[in-house]
C-alpha cells in the first residue's frame, strides 16, 4: 500500500471512529433568583455542599452575566441564543414565540442532532413553557405548597383592609417566607427533582443522547423551605444590610423599587429603596435567613440528581451546566429583588462540568454571558453551531481558564418612569461597568453611569463625570458595536388589531390530533391570554372572536404552532398534523 493510500485510510478510519463516538448527554440545571451566595463562590455563610462538589467537577465562571435581570427575557435570550434587541423580548408579558415565531431554541437544535430533550420545572418563564422545544410533553405535577391552611384566612383578612382599587384585592399571595414541616420531596422542587431522576435513569438506558433540563423555583419568592434547612443557620450570624444607600449621581430610573415583595401578605408595605422608612433589622434578618435556607434546600435537590447520575454510571459521559437567570439584592442599595443593570442583579453563578475536562475545579474571572451557553454546548456536543447564535463559545476558557481573553458581558433593562420609556445598556469589562440609558422610542442618550472594578466591586460611586474622556469614548465605541443607538418598539410580530373589537365573528377550532391543543388569544399589545382554551382530541370549540383578532394554537406535544385570525363568520379551522 502506498504512503498516500495509507494516509487516506487513516483519515477515513479516524472519521469513522469520531462518527461512532456517542454524543455526550447534557444535564441542564437552572436555579431561579440565585445570586452567587454559594460556598464555591466564596460565600462563607452558605451551606451548599452539592453545588461545591459540582464546582470541583467543572469550571466556575466568576463574572457570568445575564442579558436581562428579570426572568422571561433572560431565559428567552439564553434559550434562543439571541440578544434581547434581536429577539424583541425585554419584559415579562411577551412570549418569545410572539416576538419571533420561527425562533429555534437550544433543545430544538439539539433534537435536530439526535438528542431527546425533556424538561421539568421552570426553564422558560412559568406561563409559557414552549412545548415545541421538547421531545415529550411537559408533565403537570401535583405538589404541596408548604403553607399551613390558616394562610388562606390570613390573606382574606389582609385583602379586606386594602383600598378597593388595590390590585392585590384579587392577587395577594401568602407569606414571603415560611419554614415548613412538609417533606421537601413533596414540594414542587422536590417533586420535579424526582421526575428528573426518573428521566435520567430511563433515558440513560437508550441509544440516543439526552438533554434533561431541570429548573428550580427556589430561591424565588416565596422562600418556603423545610425547617431542617432553616436549622442549618444561626440567623444572628448572617450578614444583614440595613444601611444600604441609593447611588448618588444616577438617573431615578436606574434602580428597581422592590415591588416584587409587595405581592406577599406579610410584605404589603415593603418600602421602596428611596423611602426614608427602612425595614427593621429583625425583618431583614428573617428574609436573609429564608433566602439562605431556600438555597440550601435547592442544593440538597441538586445533590439528589448528581447522586443519581453517578449511580447510573452516566457522569463520565454527561455535560452538566448550572446557571441562574439573574442575581438578587438582599439589602444592597436599600433594595430587595432584581431588575436593574447593577452587578448585584446581572451577575450569576455559572458552572460547566464536561467529560474529560482537565481544568476541573478552576475559576475564570473573564466576563462571559449566559448567551454563550448555546454555542458552548454545541461545541462540547460536537455539533454545528447555528449561524443565528449571537453568543460565542466558552470552549477556549474551559480549556484554559487562566487565559487572558478580551471579552465583555452585556446586560440591559427596560424601565418606564414618569410615563417615559427607557432602555439601559450595561457593559461589563474586566475593569469597568459602563451603562448608557436611552429613550426607548428614539435611541437618544439620556444618562450614563460608570463604575470601576479594579479595586472596588461595590458599584456605589458613579465616576462618569470624573473619568478620562478617552476611557468613556473607548467604552462607548465598544458598546455601539453590538448595541447601536436606534429606536425600539415593544410591539411583537404577532398581535391583534387594536380595533378588532368592533366586528364580532365566531371562529371554530376542531382538534383532529391525538393530543390536547391550547388556543391562546393574543391582545393588541401582543400578550397571551392568561387562560388558554383547551380543546381535547376529537373535540370542537367555538370562540366568540372579532375580525382582526389573533389566536396562537399550540399542541401539547409540541408539533403544532399556528397563528390564526378570523376572517369569515363561523369559519372552522382544523388543527391536524402537517
Image (tube, helix red, strand yellow):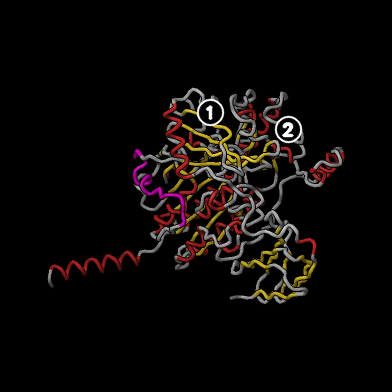
Type of secondary structure dominating the magenta stretch: loop
Image point 78% across, 44% down: which residue? 172
Can the viewer see residue 289? no
Q: Label 2's element?
A: loop
Vertical relation: 372 (above or below) 201: above
**Mark earlier in primary sequence (2, 1):** 2
Vertical relation: 408 (above or below) 237: below
Q: Does the magenta stretch include residue 402?
A: yes
Q: Position of residue 369 (x, y in %)?
A: 48, 44
Q: Label 1's element?
A: loop
Q: Where is residue 42 in the image (x, y as percent from the top left)?
A: 48, 33
Q: In which quarter of the image is the N terminus?
A: bottom left
Region rendered in magenta: 388-404
Q: Which residue in the structure is indicated by mark 1?
A: 459
Disc 2 to disc 1: CB gap under 8 Å: no
Q: Which residue in the structure is indicated by mark 2?
A: 270
Q: Is residue 282 magenta?
A: no
Query: Within 10 Å of the Cα at label 1, are there few (<14), some (14-19), or many (20+) other Cα atoms?
Result: some
Vertical relation: 465 (above or below) 336: above
Amino acid at each position: 500500500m502506498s504512503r498516500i493510500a495509507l494516509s487516506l485510510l487513516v483519515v477515513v478510519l479516524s472519521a469513522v471512529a469520531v462518527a461512532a463516538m456517542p454524543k455526550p448527554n447534557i444535564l441542564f440545571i437552572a436555579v431561579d433568583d440565585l445570586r452567587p451566595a454559594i460556598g464555591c463562590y466564596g460565600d462563607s455563610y452558605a451551606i451548599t455542599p452539592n453545588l461545591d462538589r459540582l464546582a470541583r467537577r467543572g469550571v466556575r465562571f466568576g463574572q457570568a452575566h445575564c442579558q436581562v435581570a428579570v426572568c422571561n427575557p433572560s431565559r428567552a435570550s439564553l434559550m434562543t441564543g439571541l440578544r434581547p434587541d434581536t429577539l424583541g423580548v425585554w419584559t415579562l408579558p411577551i412570549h418569545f414565540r410572539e416576538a419571533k415565531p420561527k425562533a429555534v431554541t437550544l433543545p430544538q437544535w439539539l433534537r435536530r442532532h439526535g438528542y431527546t430533550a425533556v424538561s421539568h420545572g421552570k426553564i422558560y418563564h412559568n406561563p409559557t413553557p414552549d412545548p415545541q422545544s421538547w421531545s415529550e410533553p411537559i408533565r403537570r405535577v401535583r405538589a404541596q405548597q408548604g403553607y399551613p391552611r390558616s394562610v388562606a384566612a390570613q390573606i382574606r383578612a389582609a385583602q379586606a383592609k386594602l383600598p378597593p382599587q388595590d390590585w392585590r384585592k384579587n392577587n395577594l399571595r401568602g407569606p414571603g417566607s415560611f419554614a415548613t414541616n412538609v417533606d421537601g420531596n413533596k414540594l414542587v422542587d422536590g417533586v420535579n427533582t424526582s421526575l428528573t431522576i426518573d428521566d435520567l435513569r430511563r433515558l440513560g438506558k437508550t441509544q440516543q443522547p439526552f438533554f434533561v433540563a431541570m429548573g428550580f423555583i427556589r430561591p424565588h419568592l416565596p422562600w418556603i423551605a423545610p425547617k431542617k434547612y432553616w436549622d442549618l443557620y444561626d440567623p444572628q450570624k448572617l450578614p444583614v444590610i440595613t444601611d444600604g444607600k441609593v447611588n448618588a449621581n444616577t438617573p431615578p430610573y436606574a434602580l428597581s423599587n422592590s415591588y416584587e415583595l409587595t405581592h406577599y401578605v406579610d410584605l404589603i408595605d415593603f418600602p421602596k429603596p428611596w423611602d426614608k422608612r427602612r425595614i427593621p433589622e429583625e425583618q431583614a434578618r428573617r428574609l436573609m435567613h429564608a433566602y439562605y435556607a431556600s438555597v440550601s434546600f435547592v442544593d440538597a435537590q441538586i445533590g439528589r440528581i448528581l447522586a443519581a447520575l453517578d449511580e447510573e454510571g452516566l457522569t463520565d459521559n454527561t455535560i452538566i451546566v448550572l446557571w441562574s437567570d439573574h442575581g438578587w439584592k438582599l439589602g444592597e442599595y436599600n433594595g430587595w429583588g432584581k431588575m436593574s443593570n447593577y452587578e448585584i442583579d446581572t451577575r450569576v453563578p455559572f458552572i460547566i462540568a464536561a467529560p474529560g475536562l482537565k481544568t476541573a475545579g478552576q475559576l475564570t474571572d473573564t466576563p462571559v454571558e449566559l448567551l454563550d451557553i448555546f454555542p458552548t454546548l454545541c461545541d462540547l456536543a460536537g455539533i454545528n453551531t447555528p449561524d443565528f447564535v449571537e453568543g460565542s463559545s466558552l470552549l477556549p476558557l474551559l480549556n484554559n481558564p487562566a487565559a487572558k481573553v478580551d471579552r465583555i458581558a452585556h446586560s440591559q433593562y427596560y424601565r418606564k418612569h414618569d410615563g417615559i420609556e427607557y432602555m439601559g445598556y450595561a457593559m461589563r469589562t474586566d475593569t469597568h461597568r459602563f451603562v448608557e440609558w436611552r429613550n426607548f422610542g428614539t435611541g437618544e442618550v439620556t444618562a450614563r453611569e460608570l463604575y470601576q472594578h479594579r479595586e472596588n466591586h461595590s458599584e456605589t460611586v458613579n465616576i462618569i463625570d470624573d473619568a478620562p474622556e478617552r476611557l468613556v469614548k473607548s467604552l462607548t465605541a465598544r458598546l455601539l458595536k453590538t448595541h447601536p443607538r436606534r429606536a425600539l418598539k415593544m410591539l411583537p410580530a404577532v398581535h391583534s388589531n387594536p380595533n378588532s373589537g368592533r366586528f364580532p365573528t365566531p371562529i371554530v377550532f376542531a382538534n383532529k390530533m391525538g393530543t390536547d391543543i391550547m388556543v391562546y388569544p393574543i391582545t393588541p399589545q401582543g400578550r397571551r391570554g392568561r387562560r388558554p382554551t383547551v380543546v381535547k382530541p376529537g373535540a370542537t370549540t367555538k370562540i366568540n372572536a372579532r375580525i382582526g383578532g389573533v389566536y396562537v394554537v399550540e399542541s401539547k406535544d409540541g408539533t403544532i404552532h399556528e397563528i390564526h385570525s378570523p376572517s369569515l363568520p363561523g369559519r372552522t379551522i382544523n388543527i391536524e398534523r402537517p
